Image (spheres, grey):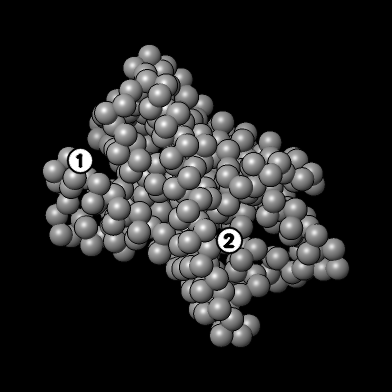
Amino acid sequence: MGRASVPESGRVGAAGVVDRAKRITFLEGVRGVAAAAVVLQHLLAEQFPGYRDWTHDYIDFGRVGVVAFFLVSGYVIPLSLAGQTLPGFAARRFFRLYPVYWLAFLVFVVVELVVRGGLEGATLPVVVLNILMLHGLIGAASLLPPAWTLSIELLYYVQSAAAKSRRLLDMSVHIGWFWLGFYFLLCVGERITGKDFPTTLPMLLFVASLGHAIHLRDASGRKAWIALLTAGAIAVPVGAYLGVDGDGEWPPFTYSLSYLAGLALFLAFYTLRDRGMARPLIFLGAISYAVYLMHPILMEVFHDIHGWVNVGINTVAVLLVAYLMHRFVEKPSIDVGRRVSSRFKK
C-alpha cells in the first residue's frame, strides 16, 4: 500500500492483492455476525417478553449489528472508489443494492396485504420514497422495517463520491468530525427543547467515517482513527444521556452500550484480519444483505407460530430464502454491475 504522500487511498502494491483479500474476508466475518445479531434480536424480542424487557434496558443486538455494518461500509467504500471511475462506482452500487431491495420490497407488500389486509402508512409519496430508498433521509416511514438504514448508507456513498470527484477521498474522513458534532448538537437540542431529533443519522455517518479512518490506517499508516474512535467513545454516550428518548425506545444506557458493542464487534474481527475466517461466517457474510432484508418478511409469514419453534423455523427459512435470493438475484445483479462498470475506463 502507498504512503501518505499518495493522493488517494487504496493504491495496491506488490503485496496489495493479498492484503485486500484478507480485508474482504474479515469484512465478510463482520457482516455475517452483524446479520445474525439483527435477526436474532428481532426474533427473540418478538417471541419472549422477558428478553424484550432485558434488551430494552441493557443492550440491543440489532443496533450492535447496524453499527458494525456501517463500520464495514466506511472501510470498504474507499477501497471500492479508489479503483473505479465515479460512473463505474455508481453502476456497481446500484446493481448491488436496488434489485434485491426492490424484490424484497415487493414481496413484503404482498405479504402485508395477505397477512394484514393492508400496508400501514403507505401513502403514495411514502411508497415512492421507499422505492427510491430515500425515505430514511427525511424521516418518512420505512415500510420494509430494516430499510431505514439504506438511505443513510446512500448518503455516505454520495459524500464519498463527491470527495473522490475533488480528489479529496482520503481527506473526507475528517467529515466524521462534522457528523459527530452534529449528532452532539442535536442531542443538546433535544435536552433544551424536550423534542426528539434524528440523532441516529449523523451518528451512523460518523461511524462510517470511523470505518474509513481504520481503512486509512492500513492504506497509508494514518492515525486519524485513534482520535475519531476516542472522541466517539466519549461523545456518543454523553450525547445519549443529554438527549431525550421521547418514545422510550432507546434509554441512554442501552443506546450507549449497543453503540460501543458494535465498535467492539468490528474491532475484534479487525484484529483477526490476518487469519482466515470460518466458512460458515463467510457464507453468512455473503448472504447478509438478503438476510437483513428478508427476515422481517418471514417473521410476518410465521407470526402465528410461537416460542422457540418460531425462532427455529424462522432461522432456517431466513437462511434458505436469503441464499436463494443471493444465488439467483443478488449475485447475477452484481455481475451485471461489474459488466456495466467495465465500460467506464479509469
Dot 1 alpha-carbon crowd within 10 angstroms: few under 14, some 14 to 19, many 20 or more: few
Residue 219, by quadrant, is bottom right
Q: Which residue is mark 1?
A: 115
Q: Which residue is mark 2?
A: 77
Marks 1/2 in contact by CB < 8 Å: the verdict is no
Give the residue at x 48% y 45%: 320
Where residue 324 sits in the image (x, y, percent)? 47, 53
Where residue 316 sits in the image (x, y, percent)? 47, 37
Where residue 197 sits in the image (x, y, percent)? 30, 41
Which sits in the foreground, 162 or 38? 38
Residue 280, by quadrant, is top right
Residue 295 appears left or right of 86: left
Image position of 305 with respect to 168: above or below? above
Indicate the amino acid at tag 2.
Ile
- Distance Cα–Cα, label 1 vs label 2: 38 Å
Give whichever of discs 1 and 2 has the lower sequence position.
2
Which sits in the foreground, 192 or 167? 167
Indicate the amino acid at tag 1.
Val
Give the residue at x 29% y 61%: 131
**Image quarter (top left, top right, bottom left or bottom right) of the C terminus:** bottom right
Give the residue at x 15% y 59%: 124
Image position of 45 with respect to 154: above or below? above
SS for callout 1: helix
Where residue 277 sits in the image (x, y, percent)? 72, 43
User: Which label sits in the foreground, 1 or 2?
Assistant: 1
**Image quarter (top left, top right, bottom left or bottom right) of the N terminus:** bottom right
SS for callout 2: helix
Residue found farthest to the right: 14
